Image (cartoon, rainbow, N blue to C red):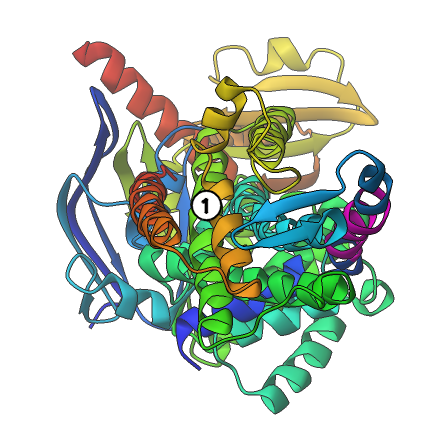
Amino acid sequence: MYCIEARSLSKSYGNLVAVDSIDLLVKPGKIFGFLGPNGAGKTTTIKLLTTLIPTSAGTINILGIDASRDPLEVRKKIGVVLQQPSYEPNLTVEKSLEKYGMMWDVDTRTRRNRVEELLSAFDLQDIRKKKNDDISIGQRRRVQVAREFMHEMDLLFLDEPTVGLDPSARRGLLDYIKGKVRDGLTIFFTTHILEEAEYLCDEIAIINHGKIIAVDTPEELKNKFGREKTIKIHIGNVENIFSILQGVGNYEISHDEGTVITIHSDDSEQVLVKILQVLNSNDIPVEDLSVVPTSLEEIFLTVVKNSDNNLGAKN
Amino acid sequence: MHPIFRLVNRNLTISLNMGFVIWQVIFPVIYIFVAGFAYTALIHNVPFGQKNLDYPAFIASGMIGFNIMNSTLISGIIIWNDRRHGMFEQILVGPFTRAQYILSNVYTIGIIGLFSAGLITAIGYPLFFKSVEFNLLTVPLVVFASITGAILFGSIASIISTRLKSSEGFNVIINTVFLFFAFVSTAFYPAQGAPPILATAFYLNPLTYLVDVVRAGIFGNFTETVGYEMIVLVVAAAVLFGIATKLLSKLEI
């Protein structure tokens, strides 16, 4: 059984198609990353999956419940941290957590324990008595995310939860999330920080112009779309290197402490072999050789660019 | 606990701060004890049914209705703040329905309305105790006025809060509307003797009916007219509550 099973899901606002017949399958106990450029349809998809807005077409099944038939039952089993800030301005940080737990019908003793646990886990002890109106945007975001862990849930939607967080708070949050997933929680996660997605996600979908343009594990996405590899060859100072490597193919040369030959192409390995042969035949020793791994960011940019180009070609 | 009561608990927690309570007490106290006694020089007695009320007793009883109306501003403020600070969406992705959110606001303003009525009755009692005529209808009439008035004015505040996005717009409109309700009514002065146009305007204002029902309860003057006024209040409250509910349930996210 999937935690999220959406089929042919669409949402239109007049002539604007925000989400265009997408399919989503999320397995339990996994972190599913949902990436896309601004305005691609990520937040609309989250609002559809969390039953906040009605669908224009398609079906949604969350944790085995038909979301259109029983949205309240769905909402009782999920947690949602929306992209936009949400807070009670005149409540203190600890009171916000406590009241949120009360709203979810968590018993008093559990609430008290969880408040203490979350204040520590999210580094909120120093500001526990401060009102939400008097704390920084990043602190408020931490409270907003922490608050969602006041109640039990099987599935958590996190829409850009790390916006406004400093690097250490961000890492702390990501590790806390990882811990919760180890305990069995499933997470649907959107972000613009691709290192986060790479660090966290078991599976990633990329959406652009309301359509899913790629879905796979981060590694498989790299294998599929990361054909261009970057290889750097460090050699000593060789002044006539251009003439030596003439005709070899795609490479760039830069001079720093010595000479660096950078290969960045679809057939980096073949270019590398040719260059090594030339260097060897000219008795030029290789001091260092490094392969720069393809980042998810490059994959993301490639996939989105291809999708934009395809759309442009169709239009 | 039922979801509606959990939301009411939350509404009361975020609304009932010291500032609100002071505002709820200080304003009526000033009106009752300062304006009440200061205007006694101008208005000696106000005829009311078979009685002649002194002005402090008249204004103290009017302040009960005024405070019920004033306290229901909280309904608009809760909705407006929830929208502004993202809690409206957050609640609706939680274990609540829109209907529960709306009903929780009704319960909240009902509780605050009753609290306000009780508070001002206690504060104003020394002034109108000489004229008080307790009977079987006293408490039911005051409770009826508190709840109907809270729903009626709470609905008006809710309607305004669903239509306006800027804080300036919300504050200006809500204060203007409620200022009109407060002063174009019989809460502060009797309709008798007022210019005919103003006296007519008094009776286009639901606060007048609310205040009349409260006074009928306190001073034991239940007449046929008061019965009609109660019907007008119920109908107006039902219509406005229907409009507020419709607007809230259509509020875009």
Quadrant for residue A307, please give it. top left
- Crowding near pointer 1: few (<14 within 10 Å), some, many (20+)? many
On the image, the x and y values in percent for residue A78 come to 38, 67
Q: Which quarter of the image is occupied by the C terminus of chain A?
A: top left
Q: Nearer the viewer, residue A207 or B12?
A: B12
Question: In the rendered structure, which segment of residues is drawn in magenta?
Answer: B22-35
Q: Residue at x 81, y 42 (%)?
A: B40
Residue A275's place in the image compared with A287, above or below, is above
Q: Is A169 colored magenta in this rendering?
A: no
The residue lying furthest to the bottom in this view is A109
Q: Which quarter of the image is occupied by the N terminus of chain A?
A: bottom left
Question: As drawn, is A143 to the left or to the right of B141?
Answer: right
Q: Nearer the viewer, residue A16 or A162?
A: A16
Q: Report the residue marked by disc 1.
A: B209
On the image, the x and y values in percent for residue B83 come to 52, 42
Residue B140's place in the image compared with B247, above or below, is below
On the image, the x and y values in percent for residue B34 come to 86, 45
Question: As drawn, is A123 to the left or to the right of B234?
Answer: right
